[in-house]
Amino acid sequence: MSHVLVDTHVLAWSLVAPSFLTAAARSLLESGATIHVPPCAFHEIASKVRKGKWDAMLPYARSLDSLCSAQGFSIAPYTARMAMLSGSMEWDHPDPFDRMIAATAIEMSCPLISKDTAFDGLIGFAGWKGRIW
C-alpha cells in the first residue's frame, strides 16, 4: 500500500498511546507508506483540548504539524472539491470531522486507518477505498 489517511484518534494514539493501535495499524504506520493526516484532525484535537475533553493531548495540541513532520507524516490537502463532497455526500453520518476525513480519503483515493466503524457505511460509495483497523 503506497499511501493511507489516518483518522484523528490514530494520529493522537500514534503520539501518546501507540499500544491502542492494532498490529495492522502500527504495521502500516511503520511500513514506509506515505501517511497522510487530514488538516481537520488538528482542529478536532485543538477543540477538544480547549474544551477540556482530551487532556492527554494538551502537550501536543499546539505543535501537531511539527510532530507529524517528525514522524514522517504528510499533511493532506483539503480542497474546495473535498469540502463540497463532505457536505453533499449521501452518508447518514452527522459528524463534520468524519465527513471531512471521508471526503479527503475519497478524493485522495486512499484507504483510511480508523477504529470507527461508522466509516463502513461508505462501502460501495464511489471512490471509497475502505477502512483498515
Image: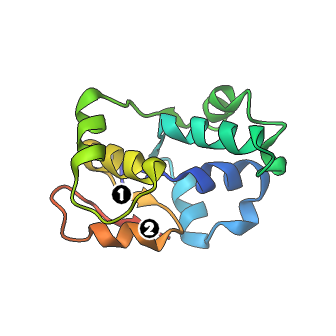
From the image, tell me which residue sits under label 2: 132
Disc 1 and disc 2: Cα gap in Å? 7 Å
Q: Which residue is drawn at 84% across and 37% down?
A: 59
Q: The residue tagged with tag 1: helix, strand or loop?
A: loop
Q: Residue at x 50, y 34 (%)?
A: 39
Q: Which amino acid does label 1 sit on?
A: Pro
- x and y percent of residue 80 in the render? 27, 28
User: Neighbour class for label 1 at 10 Å: few (<14), some, many (≥20)?
Assistant: many
In which quadrant of the rendered image does the N terminus lie? bottom left
> Seen from this angle, which residue lies furthest left?
126
Q: In which quarter of the image is residue 117?
A: bottom left
Indicate which disc, 1 or 2, sits on the residue closer to the N terminus.
1
From the image, tell me which residue sits under label 1: 111
Q: Is residue 117 above or below residue 36?
A: below
Q: How many marks?
A: 2
- x and y percent of residue 93 in the render? 38, 63
- x and y percent of residue 16 in the render? 78, 52
Q: Tell whether 106 sits left or right of 13.
A: left
Q: Tell whether 29 sits left or right of 96.
A: right
Q: In this view, does 71 lie above or below 6?
A: above
Q: What residue type is labelled 2?
A: Ile
Q: The residue tagged with tag 2: helix, strand or loop?
A: strand
Q: Residue 66 carries which label?
A: none
Q: Nearer the viewer, residue 71 or 59?
A: 59
Q: Is residue 126 above or below residue 71?
A: below
Q: Is residue 72 visible?
A: no
Q: Tell whether 41 sits left or right of 70.
A: left
Q: Quadrant of residue 27?
A: bottom right
